[in-house]
């Protein structure tokens, strides 16, 4: 139960990875109660019939069983959503971190299309505003795919870096990874199944360079650590996932000590490697101007921001970013969205749940937006120490008291931390508060010792919240 949930009129603590099932249950109620905007569907939704057929199989009772809710909670939410104007849904990233995360987003995104919520100012749905910036930002100017001249370099998924760093060369995988340059990340702390990640970075034959502000867990394994500038020391242009303003970041102070912007490090590296393409000499200002060619850069630089010229009701009359401007239910290559249960849950993996009966999610600790903030002593002081939050019933059944040291474990590893027993975790679910650096953990590990390298159904993204564990007194 988060601080946001505390401020809401109602909080439904559904089981991890079941958001898609809840969306199905809501669709069922919208259909059987006549709460659809039939005109909006007819004009702007392509292929509603198969979605309708699937939704009618998801009664409130079925959805409630899957989600760990009551049928009345499903009915009540559907009624409130259908009869409230405007009605807005704010998605976030945690609900995607399970096997069916992509399909869950697609199902939830259908809801405002069925009720016509896009017709009202303030209605609709937001996951991220980043798509709106595609018309303003020229990604190709920054990434320069033309320089590949048809070559297709291998891409390694950071979510599977633990396995990939330990792979030998093969026809399927390609050559063994022999060198890594890490910037803007701390994979030893934040990548899943971190025991394998550590083993990979400890390889004697792996050459590792880390561009960093601080001596993170990953920097501890580097052959070279190159000091990087902070946001206060370099020029950059920013877009957003929460608003529609392009921003400029002017340096407040010159780079301190030997710190250099990432761009400068790569410019100098390119020069030493003999690359002569003119783009490798572009200054940060030149890169920034190239990034936003359709905007008045001088105005952006002097004022600090430019708001994108977007309509108040972008989808009131359709206009979705599809070939025909309509919502496409049966999307090419993906089909009609459906509910996919988690890889690891009591319902989907009963044999595994016999040994590890608790579902674990691992959101960042309240004062750590990302792992960089763990370096800040004042924020660490507020957080205190790494915690796992348990419901009182789960703690009592295991002889665990508030403040006791516990061992959280599964087949992937073990994590030693302090237990916090209270009302933030629902029964059957534990919250392993994340992004603490491993070296600050009681046994030199963090919660990602337990998370899986399996990937989501769409986008090959991580499944951090698709994880069964057991908790025992240490």
Image (tube, grey):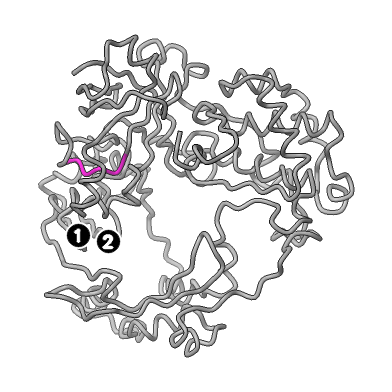
- Residue 301: image location, x then y, percent: 44, 85
In front of the other: 68 or 444: 68
Mark 1 surroundings: few (<14), some (14-19) or many (≥20) residues within 10 A: many
- Residue 95: image location, x then y, percent: 51, 39
Residue 183 disc label: 2
Residue 343 disc label: none
Residue 246 vertical placement versus 22 (above, below): below
- Residue 277: image location, x then y, percent: 34, 83
- In the image, residue 436 lies in the stretch drawn in magenta: yes
**In this picture, residue 81 sits left or right of residue 354:** right
Give the SS element for disc 2: strand
Question: Principal SS element in the magenta part?
Answer: loop
- In the image, residue 255 lies in the stretch drawn in magenta: no
- The part of the image, by quadrant, that contains residue 414 is top left
Judging by the rendered image, the residue that carries numbered circle 1 is 210
- The part of the image, by quadrant, that contains residue 391 is top left
x 49%, y 42%: residue: 4
Residue 35 vertical placement versus 276 (above, below): above
Q: CA distance from mark 1 to mark 2?
A: 6 Å
Residue farthest to the bottom, as pictured: 298
x 49%, y 29%: residue: 16
- Report the magenta residues as a range: 434-438
In front of the other: 404 or 407: 404
Contact (CB < 8 A) between labels 1 and 2?
yes
In front of the other: 323 or 90: 90
In front of the other: 372 or 70: 70
x 79%, y 44%: residue: 115
- Badge 1 or badge 2: first in the primary sequence: 2
**In this picture, residue 365 sits left or right of residue 338:** left
């Amino acid at each position: 139960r988060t601080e946001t949930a505390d401020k809401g009129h109602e909080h439904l603590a559904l089981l991890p990875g079941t958001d898609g099932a809840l969306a199905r249950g809501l669709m069922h109620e919208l259909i059987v109660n006549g709460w659809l905007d039939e005109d909006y569907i007819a004009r702007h939704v392509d292929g509603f019939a198969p979605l309708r057929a699937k939704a009618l199989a998801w009664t409130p009772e079925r959805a409630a069983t899957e989600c760990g809710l009551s049928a009345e909670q499903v009915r009540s939410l559907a009624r409130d959503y259908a009869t409230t104007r405007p009605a807005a849904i704010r998605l976030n990233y945690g609900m995607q971190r399970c096997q069916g995360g992509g399909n869950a987003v697609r199902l939830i995104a259908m809801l405002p299309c069925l009720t016509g919520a896009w017709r009202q100012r303030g209605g609709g749905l937001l996951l991220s505003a980043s798509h709106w910036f595609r018309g303003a930002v020229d990604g190709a100017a920054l990434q320069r795919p033309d320089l590949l001249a048809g070559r297709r370099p291998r891409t390694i998924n950071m979510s599977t870096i633990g396995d990939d760093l330990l792979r030998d060369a093969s026809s399927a995988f390609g050559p063994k990874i022999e060198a890594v340059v890490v910037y803007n990340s701390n994979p030893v702390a934040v990548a899943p199944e971190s025991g394998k990640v550590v083993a990979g970075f400890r390889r004697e034959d792996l050459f590792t360079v880390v561009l960093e502000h601080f001596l993170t867990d990953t920097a501890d394994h580097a052959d070279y650590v190159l000091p990087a500038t902070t946001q206060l020391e370099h020029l950059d242009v920013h877009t957003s996932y929460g608003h529609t303003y392009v921003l400029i970041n002017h340096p407040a102070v010159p780079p301190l000590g030997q710190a250099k912007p990432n761009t400068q490090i790569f410019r100098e590296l390119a020069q030493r490697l003999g690359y002569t393409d003119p783009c490798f000499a572009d200054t940060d200002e030149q890169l920034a101007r190239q990034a936003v060619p359709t905007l008045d850069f001088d105005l952006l630089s002097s004022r600090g921001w430019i708001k994108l010229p977007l309509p108040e009701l972008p989808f009131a009359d359709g206009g979705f970013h599809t070939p025909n401007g309509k919502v496409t239910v049966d999307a090419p290559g993906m089909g009609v969205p459906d509910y996919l249960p988690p890889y690891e849950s009591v319902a989907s993996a009963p044999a595994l749940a016999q040994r590890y009966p608790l579902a674990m999610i691992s959101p960042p600790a309240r004062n750590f937006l990302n792992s960089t903030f763990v370096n800040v002593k004042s924020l660490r002081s507020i957080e205190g120490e790494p915690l796992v939050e348990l419901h009182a019933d789960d703690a009592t059944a295991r002889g665990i008291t508030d403040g006791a040291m516990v061992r959280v474990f599964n087949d992937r590893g073990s994590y030693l931390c302090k237990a916090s027993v209270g009302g933030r975790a629902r029964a059957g679910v534990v919250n392993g508060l994340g992004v603490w650096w491993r070296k600050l953990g009681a046994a030199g590990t963090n919660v990602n010792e337990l998370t899986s390298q399996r990937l989501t159904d769409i986008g090959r993204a991580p499944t951090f919240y698709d994880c069964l564990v057991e908790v025992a007194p240490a």
